[in-house]
Image: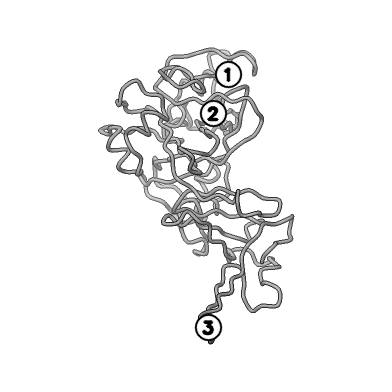
Amino acid sequence: MMRSNQLEQLLVFIFILSPTLLVLVTHAKSTIEACSSSDSCTSLLSYIVPWDSKFSEIAYRFQVNVFDVLAANSINLTIPSPGNQILQAKSLLKIPNSCACVDGIRRSIIAYTVKAADSLDLISEGYGGLVSAEQIRTMNRIGSENPLTSGQSIMIQLPCTCFNNTNNGVASVYMSYVVQSGESLSSIGREFDATLKQLVSINGLDQPRVDPGDILAIPFSACSSANLHWYNESLIVPNGSTALTANDCITCFCRPSSLKLHCSPSGIVASCSHLQCKESDLFIGDVSIQQNAIGCNVSTCLYRGHNGRKIFRR
């Protein structure tokens, strides 16, 4: 049975008739998290690119900043014309996603503009199976009296989970992953460094079995700014990944070995100020080690959050 903050796995919530009326429709297993507040959390979507696509096209599809996609996958942010870089079909990307609480369920809802050649199946394929054709049909009441038409704006519901951004007391970010043909829970665990026990518990599985199309919540240990006393900011970054902050002036990398954030200038914004520590030649992220008579004197310039365009450092 699923734990108390989840619902039955073989059921998914879909809007129908009105934004507040929910019905249950049998579908592939998906981990659903109940919620009671209006807060949102950082989450990830595992996206297998269905066809050759530019980074800008992928970012537009998921309504995120192209630099955020690069950062989430630890791709060099300073590559020339990043939006025009082409990713080959079947490539795996992590898409950063804000997971909101909507009518008591954790989910992300974005808008999609229908193209002339689109069908419900093609739109579903474009999102890597994170949403099914039937879910799109039901949520948008597509039918004979309301056919899919070019230029129409429809809503796409994407799966996400928060679980308080913790996993057994460790700061964590959860990724929604679509099970592929030939995969097992064990093979998925090995790929993403998660134990079988963790995946069974988190996803509330009665038995360690999954089928193609099922959507799992996979935990990634993460770095958190919660104990860093940052000014007016909270940031959580999956291990081995990078996140942009301070109006894209600062990039923060989560070191897998220590789960500590290392922040430095991103190099992608020209109009950033306050990057140099006072009375020092050091910029944010710099470390200086000087020998003296009794040992070493270590100086650092650390990022401490931001307020609008003002960046705090120490």
Residue type at mark 1 is: Phe
Residue 166 in percent (x, y) is at 51, 39
The residue carrying mark 3 is 294
Q: Earlier in the sequence, mark 1 or mark 3?
A: 1
Residue 39 in percent (x, y) is at 65, 34
In the depicted structure, whether residue 17 falls above or below residue 90: above
Q: At 65% across and 28% down in the image, what residue appears? A: 37
Mark 2 lies on a secondary structure that is strand
Circle 1 packing at 10 Å, graded few (<14), some (14-19), many (20+), is: some
Q: Are marks 1 and 3 in contact (CB under 8 Å)?
A: no
- Judging depth in this view, the residue of 293 and 233 nearest the camera is 293
Eye-nearest disc, 1 or 3: 3
The residue carrying mark 1 is 15
Q: In this view, does 163 lie to the left or right of 281?
A: left
Q: Are marks 2 and 1 in contact (CB under 8 Å)?
A: yes
Q: Tell me which corner region of the image, top left, top right, bottom left or bottom right, holds residue 50.
A: top left
In the depicted structure, whether residue 243 falls above or below residue 133: below
Residue 63 in percent (x, y) is at 58, 42
Residue type at mark 3 is: Ile
Q: At 59% across and 51% down in the image, what residue appears? A: 225
Residue type at mark 2 is: Gln
In the depicted structure, whether residue 74 falls above or below residue 53: below
Mark 3 lies on a secondary structure that is loop
Q: Earlier in the sequence, mark 2 or mark 1?
A: 1
- Determine the CA span between mark 2 and mark 3: 61 Å
